Amino acid sequence: MPQVSLCFTGHIEGELGLGPLQGTDSRWQRPDQERSDQATFSQRREANAPMAEKTRAATMDKITALCKRRGFVFPGSEIYGGLANTWDYGPLGVELKNAIKQLWWKTFVQRRRDMVGLDGGILMHPRVWEASGHVVNFNDPLVDCKTCKSRFRADHLIEEKLGIHAEGKTPDEMTALLREANLPCPKCGNRTLTDARQFNMMFSTTIGPVEESGTKVYLRPETAQAMFVQYKNILNTGRVKLPFGIGQIGKAFRNEITPGNFIFRDIEFEQMEIEYFARPEETADLFDAWIDAMWNWVDLIGLRRENVHVREHAKEELSHYSSRTIDFEYLFPEPMNWKELYGLASRTDFDLARHQEYSGEDLTYFDQPTGQRFLPHVIEPTFGVDRTFLVLLLDAYDEEETVDVNGKPDTRIVLRLHPRVAPYKAAILPLMKKPELAAVAHELFDRIEAETSYLVDYDETANIGKRYRRQDEIGTPFCITVDYDTLEDRAVTIRDRDTTSQQRVAIDEVVNFLREHVG
Ligand code: GAP
């Protein structure tokens, strides 16, 4: 029987070891509390990938390729030649997405006593979208090229080609800028762009067997409206009192003129939204509290703070319902630069007032402490699931120059995802495909499965070095190797993804180890 001995600090595949960890970094501490597990993760990551000293490894092309290679995201309907700008989330993608959604739900709905949840329908009464203003206002300005028939967002074209921030300008104002610059079509080069005109972004469909006599309905372009429409039912059944919020996760659909940049701008995507109802005089302070809560979320999922900033919307940029909006923007790789990741808007009583007017239902709130009746005002923190997914990968992607077992230069691709969001929290790897090792490995797998909620991978194919590399590339924070010594000492080797350091841990302690390090 072959005996392979693993020592405490050695490296099974001869990976490069890294020096001792450096001091803590305050950027990683949440504003309201220090998290020792967060600091540990950040220490490890900073020790291995000091961003100031090395250029950022991630590009959109590399992330798109990794997503396909490792089963995170596949192009939609690929065997039929694909359907432009549609994507399917594969086995690892669905786990990462679920990890994001579960963490968000726990953080913002289950752990807060001022929040309740909702799962509204995608199809709603068509009047909802008249009341919300989407039928009239949910437009993007577009220009067509008369020669090659390509279509572009007028505001994006002005921003990219003329360096003028154009969001919020009217089509006439955009047309004037385009005419003055006499811009060529970015695709065919002819100066044959049309004037800017508005294009409604809602997808419609029909309820009923015959299109002509059926009811035209829209696929919801945001999850928000169900929370306004069901506000009264929640008030009557949920035993909620101001200020309180409703949270929802679900799909939204937008007929984007220029989707793209992988999953950054999709036509079908998921949102995690909150409508937070409050007394009008409370909203300014609550807006600030929600800024802090959103920063806490950024920290919780392990994004680097230097890649996120807040941008206040100028007056002319504000949506029709908003009195104040800020965007949390993320620094995407060139040429995208800073783009919206999340939004926070003060929606006043616009939505409730409109739904009250259009439905004829009384949506006022009776405030017992003051004896007053009024329409609550609303703060809306909104988060895109797919954008969170994308920035987690961009932020975590790293390439490390190393040497292989033969001493040749090699590149280790590693996703330094926070363990909290990593699809697999650990992988169990019997050193060889042998029944006696598999028996112990299965026992450990079953134990983790029974005692925690962590998803754990099991892999006994290929050599151990290749298996480590696969786990590095999919962001698994810990590899647990079962070897022949395990049969004697009932201990396993746990390898840290970020440092590649290894330590021997008793089988009985593995669950505790994971609880301590995953969080
Ligand atoms: N209820 C307000 C609302 O829908 P939004 O800024 O249009 O506001 C909220 O969208 C979030 O949804 C964005 O911050 C972004 O994360 C995500 N999102 C919006 N459009 C998207 C698209 N076409 N593809 C992917 N995510 C999108």
Image: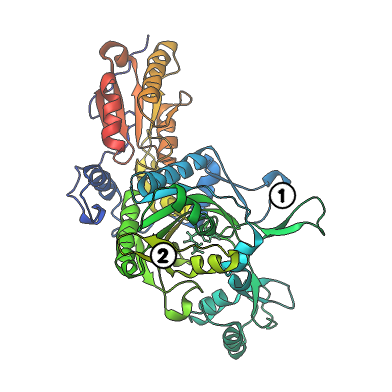
- At which x and y percent is residue 124? 62, 56
Residue for point 59% across, 63% down: 359
In the rendered image, the residue lying farthest to the left is 23
- What number is the disc on residue 376? 2
Along the line of sight, the residue nearer the viewer: 252 or 501:
252
Q: Evaluate whether residue 341 shows in this view.
A: yes
Up the image or down, 36 lies above or below 432; here it is below
Along the line of sight, the residue nearer the viewer: 177 or 19:
177
In the rendered image, the residue lying farthest to the front is 371
Residue 221 lies left or right of residue 147; in this view the side is left
| Mark 2: amino acid | Pro
Residue 46 lies left or right of residue 92; in this view the side is left
SS of the residue at dot 1? loop
Q: Evaluate whether residue 11 shows in this view.
A: no
| Mark 1: amino acid | Gly
Q: Which residue is mark 1?
A: 81
Along the line of sight, the residue nearer the viewer: 15 or 178:
178
Up the image or down, 490 lies above or below 174; here it is above
| Res. 200 image quadrant | bottom right
Q: Residues within 10 Å of mark 2 (few under 14, many from 20)?
A: many
Marked residue nearer the N-terminal end (1 or 2): 1
